[in-house]
Amino acid sequence: MKRLVLVGTVIGALTTSGAFAQANKGGQEAGHTAPKAQPPTEASPSAPAGEMALGSVHLAKGVKADGKPLAPGTYQVRLTAQAASPDAKGQTATLERWVEFVQGGQVKGREVVSIVPRPDVAKVQKDAPPSGNSSKVELLKGGDYYRVWINRGGNYYLIHLPVA
């Protein structure tokens, strides 16, 4: 009797697996479906190509730009086409570039600028941004850095300069 039950169980299992194989002739296993559509990715942030004048800023105290002293005064800030390197992990290459501080037609210093598209500014800064086509220069908490924040052409440009 035990043998009959065992043989019946084996035959039943084989029959069930054969029916399962015929039902899935398409090669897919039961329970598997086509991959779900991925959510749309965000559009690549836009930054101006080439060089561009960003405006003028007044630095009340001496700072360091690219490790070199930059005297107090008013400077024209110019975005260069040169990307900052080495690349920061997770950053878009076109959003980390160099700016030049120009005074009297001469480049007095340069520093890396972070370009923040308008829709992303709330993710980066909590302070109120400067109004359109203007700038703010602020001494940050702790007094170790000045932040030059420029609003130009739909993007924000953030430059951090250590106090000299």
Image (tube, grey):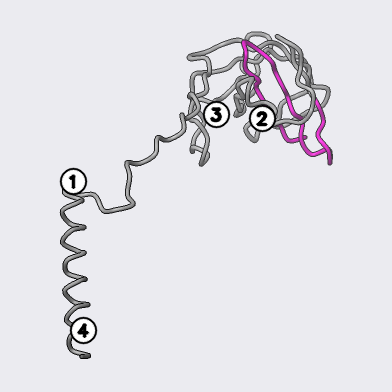
Q: Quadrant of the N terminus?
A: bottom left
The answer to which image quadrant residue 36 occupies is: top left
Which numbered disc, 3 or 2, marks the residue that appears first in the sequence? 2
**Amino acid type indicated by mark 1:** Gly
Question: Dot 4: few (<14), some (14–19), or many (≥20) neighbours within 10 Å?
Answer: few
Residue 41, above or below 58: below
Residue occupied by mark 3 = 96
Distance CA(mark 3)–CA(mark 1): 50 Å
Task: Return the x and y of residue 22 as percentages of the image width and height.
Answer: 15, 53
Task: Return the x and y of residue 122 as percentages of the image width and height.
Answer: 70, 28
Which numbered disc, 4 or 2, marks the residue that appears first in the sequence? 4
Identify the element where label 3 is drawn.
strand
Residue occupied by mark 1 = 26
Instruction: Tell whether position 147 is magenta.
Output: yes
User: Residue at coordinates 15% horizontally, 61% vertically from top-left?
Assistant: 18
Distance CA(mark 3)–CA(mark 4): 72 Å
User: Residue at coordinates 82% horizontally, 31% vertically from top-left?
Assistant: 139
Task: Return the x and y of residue 133 as percentages of the image width and height.
Answer: 70, 9
**Amino acid type indicated by mark 3:** Glu
Between residues 85 and 48, which one lies in front from this camera angle? 48
Q: Quadrant of the C terminus?
A: top right
- Residue 164: tell me if it is visible: no
User: Residue at coordinates 26% horizontally, 53% vertically from top-left?
Assistant: 29
